[in-house]
Image: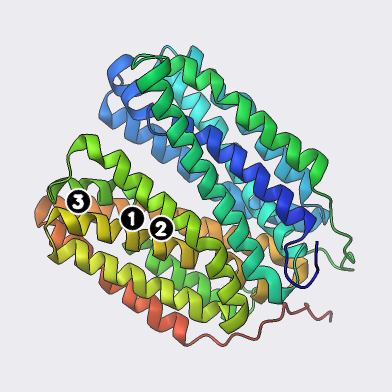
Amino acid sequence: MSNNKKISRNVFFLGLTSFFNDWSSEMIFPILPAFMAEILGIPKSVIGLIDGVAESLASILKVFSGYVSDRLDRRKNLAVAGYILSTIVKPLLALAQSWLAVFSVRVGDRIGKGIRTAPRDALIAASAESKKRGRSFGFHRAMDTLGALFGTLTTFILLRYILGPQSHRTIFALSAIPAVIGVMFIIFGAKEPKTIRPKEKPKLSWKALPKNLRILIVATFIFGIGNYTFTFFLLRIRTMGIAMAIVPLVYLLYNVVYSAVSYPAGILADKIGKRKVYAIGLVMYILTALGMAFFNASIWAWVLMGTYGLHMGFTNATARALVSDFAPVEIRGTALGMYHTGIGIADLPAGLLAGFLWELYSPKIVFSVGAILATIALLIVLMIKENGKSPVIKKN
């Protein structure tokens, strides 16, 4: 590979790992709600509890796994452990006969995600110099989302043309195949970068983060409260006249745009600045939210979900690259963990806020508030100075 234009070996193999892991996960995701509600008869309130506890655990674990990777100065082994755990537990859904069994699998899978995310992102950051970091995270996000596309299409084909509509358990079992392939790529393809161990062990401290990084995390948290879960976007497009049978195609459009844009957006971030590209992504979310608030024709549902895919392509990978640039090398895993945890913590108030506003007022108010919160986050981000270099902690 040319050092001038292409990504590193580690980033390439980590991208393949995420591609196959998301292929596996998205074979399960589209049909799991129906499996829980219609086949196992789990009440909606319990389904919400299962998802809430599982996602919260993943969010909390991300900061600690990042911190541990900094303390050990080892990223790969933790990332591998997280992927292996998820690979083992996800197919066990095929044996689930109760809500407790589903809960155990979901929690195990999310624990795996919580363990691997921050160390994996720190491994990507360590495998790319700052001027190629946007490209590297963009490639990884593109592969991840492309895997989601393949997973969704695989399940659709299996249900519609091969196995039949009641083949949930078989699909859960088959999801192990791409997951195992993904684990093989990180085990045998990725390597632990050589780093200089700091004389002092890093501390799990908010104050240890540089000011710019703390401001960025606060901005992403504020944005996260108004960046509602995908469920509310799907509910909104239904009210815009999109038939239930067409919803998966709109979801597919979102993922196609997200995947197609991530890598070019990462390259652009390296050229013009990651903060600028992240800000552009926030503007796209503001436009999406305003459109969701004020437009009602079904054609706008397609346009706005495409715009939402652009937003994700411009922000998701770029934010990780920006955090990696701002974080001192010694605490990069911790910083990435705090970033991911902040987003995860914001999910709970975001869901409560959206549900409350939807029930008491209307979708127009829900997405108008989302646009306002995104605008506040954008103004904060525009105040951040980007130096493009990872600082080093000074020893006293």
Q: Position of residue 238 (x, y in %)?
A: 17, 45
The residue tagged 1 is 349
Q: Are marks 2 and 3 in contact (CB under 8 Å)?
A: no
Q: Is residue 267 left or right of residue 41?
A: right
Q: Residue at x 48, y 67 (%)?
A: 315
Q: Secondary structure at mark 2?
A: helix
Q: Which mark is residue 346?
A: 2
How far is mark 1 from mark 2, CA to CA?
A: 6 Å
Q: Residue at x 78, y 67 (%)?
A: 330
Camera-nearest residue between 325 and 25: 25
User: Which quadrant of the structure image shows residue 42?
Assistant: top left
Q: Which circle's residue, 2 or 3, is located before the other in the chain?
A: 3
Q: Secondary structure at mark 1?
A: helix
Q: Secondary structure at mark 3?
A: helix
Please determine whether, in this image, residue 126 is positioned above or below residue 238. below
* Disc 1 residue crowd, few under 14, some 14–19, many 20+, Cα 10 Å: some
Q: Are marks 1 and 2 in contact (CB under 8 Å)?
A: yes
Q: Which circle's residue, 3 or 1, is located before the other in the chain?
A: 3
Q: Which mark is residue 193?
A: none
Q: Position of residue 146 (x, y in %)?
A: 52, 47
Specify the amino acid type for callout 2. Answer: Ala
The residue tagged 3 is 236
